[in-house]
């Protein structure tokens, strides 16, 4: 499982002793992605990865979220599997 770090934005509120209040996008998303090619071990049958990310709206409409998903290094993050 891999968390894609959410974009943070400052809130229009005064800083506290803990620092400046920040907000992240309000919609939490999870997706299980499967490839029928192994990520590392050629003797395996495929690879998979569960990704967690945040975005502003429901559905895959957020370009920043799409770009973040595409930037994941599949070969280093995914887990190989056999049937």
Image (cartoon, rainbow, N blue to C red):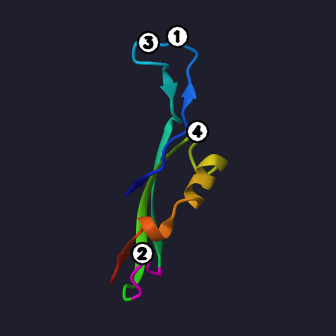
**Residue 47, label in figure:** 2
Relative to 75, residue 19 above or below: above
**Residue 28, label in figure:** none
Are discs 2 and 1 less than 8 Å apart at CB? no
Between discs 3 and 2, the one toward the N terminus? 3
Mark 4 = which residue? 56
- Which quadrant is home to the N terminus? bottom left
Q: Nearer the viewer, residue 48 or 41?
A: 41
Relative to 2, residue 9 above or below: above
Q: Which residue is drawn at 50% across and 25% down?
A: 22
Badge 3 marks a residue whose secondary structure is: loop
The magenta span reads 36-42
Instruction: Give me the C-alpha separation between circle 2 and circle 1.
Output: 46 Å
Instruction: Give me the C-alpha separation between circle 3 and circle 1.
Output: 6 Å
Q: Is 41 positioned to the left or the right of 8 in the image?
A: left
From the image, state whether disc 4 or disc 3 is nearer to you: 3
Q: Residue at x 56, y 24 (%)?
A: 10
Relative to 1, residue 62 above or below: above
From the image, state whether disc 2 or disc 4 is nearer to you: 2
Residue 54 image offset from top left, x and y in percent: 50, 43
Furthest-bottom residue in this view? 43
Q: Can residue 74 be seen in this view?
A: yes
From the image, state whether disc 1 or disc 4 is nearer to you: 1
Mark 1 = which residue? 14
Q: Is 82 positioned to the left or the right of 67 in the image?
A: left
Badge 2 marks a residue whose secondary structure is: strand
């Amino acid at each position: 499982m891999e968390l894609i770090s959410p974009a943070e934005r400052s809130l229009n509120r005064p800083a506290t002793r803990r620092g400046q209040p920040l907000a992240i996008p309000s919609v939490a998303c999870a997706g299980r992605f499967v490839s029928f090619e192994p990520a590392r071990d050629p003797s395996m049958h495929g690879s998979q990865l569960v990704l967690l990310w945040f975005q502003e709206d429901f559905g895959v409409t957020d370009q920043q979220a799409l770009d973040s998903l595409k930037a994941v290094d599949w070969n280093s993050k995914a887990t190989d599997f056999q049937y």
